Image (spheres, rainbow, N blue to C red):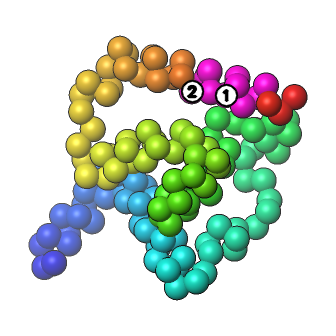
Amino acid sequence: MNLISSTRVSLAARQDPLRAASWAILAVSALSGLARLAGYSMASALPKVTLCPFKALTGLPCPGCGMTHAFLALGRLDLAGACADNPLVFPLAVLVALCAIGRIPRSLRSPKVTVPALAGVLIFWAFRLSHCL
């Protein structure tokens, strides 16, 4: 990578922080897989503290609870573990990858897609809460 192309990447990251965050998520997931190959588990190194403000206040999981562990499991190619941590990781991983390469189709941004997707997340959350109570 030459200086001009690295400057373009740097400028793109500054102009689109969501894209930069997407690359960071993908990088950490990949590092988790590489660490696992070396015999180290990044998931076990995470502290057992509640990072979710909703769970800290209510004791109940939010729709995104377990997502960090799920992405780390995806990095290790542990699909069953990722699903156990949070099954929403699979569609979110696709969106993160599309966002990282800057290719989110306009059709995914339309209310015809976002409203049913939000409804699906709310149904998932209700199901998750029903198992906690």
Q: Position of residue 51 (x, y in %)?
A: 73, 53
| Left or right of 7 on screen, residue 130 | right
Q: Position of residue 109 (x, y in %)?
A: 32, 26
2 and 1 marks in contact (CB < 8 Å): yes
From mark 2 to mark 1, how far is it between C-alphas? 6 Å
Most extreme residue toward the bottom, as rendered? 38
Estimate how packed mark 1 is, as few (under 14), some (14 to 19) or many (20 or more) residues with alpha carbons within 10 Å.
Answer: some
Q: Is residue 54 above or below residue 16?
A: above
For image coordinates 14% across by 70% down, the residue present is 5
For image coordinates 80% across by 59% down, the residue present is 49
Residue 98 on the magenta span: no
Q: Which is more toward the observer, 59 or 10?
A: 59
Residues in magenta, as a range? 121-130
| Left or right of 71 on screen, residue 104 | left
The residue to which callout 1 is attached is: 125
Q: Secondary structure at mark 2?
A: helix
For image coordinates 69% across by 74% down, the residue present is 45
* Residue type pointed to by label 2: Val
Residue 23's disc number: none
| Left or right of 46 on screen, residue 88 | left
Q: Is residue 130 above or below residue 84?
A: above
Screen quadrant of the C terminus:
top right
Most extreme residue toward the front, as rendered? 80
Can you tell which quarter of the image residue 8 is in?
bottom left
On the question of residue 28 being in view, the answer is no
Q: Is residue 25 above or below residue 65?
A: below
Q: Position of residue 4 (x, y in %)?
A: 12, 72
Screen quadrant of the N terminus:
bottom left
For image coordinates 67% across by 44% down, the residue present is 65
The residue to which callout 2 is attached is: 121
On the question of residue 73 being in view, the answer is yes
| Left or right of 4 on screen, residue 72 | right
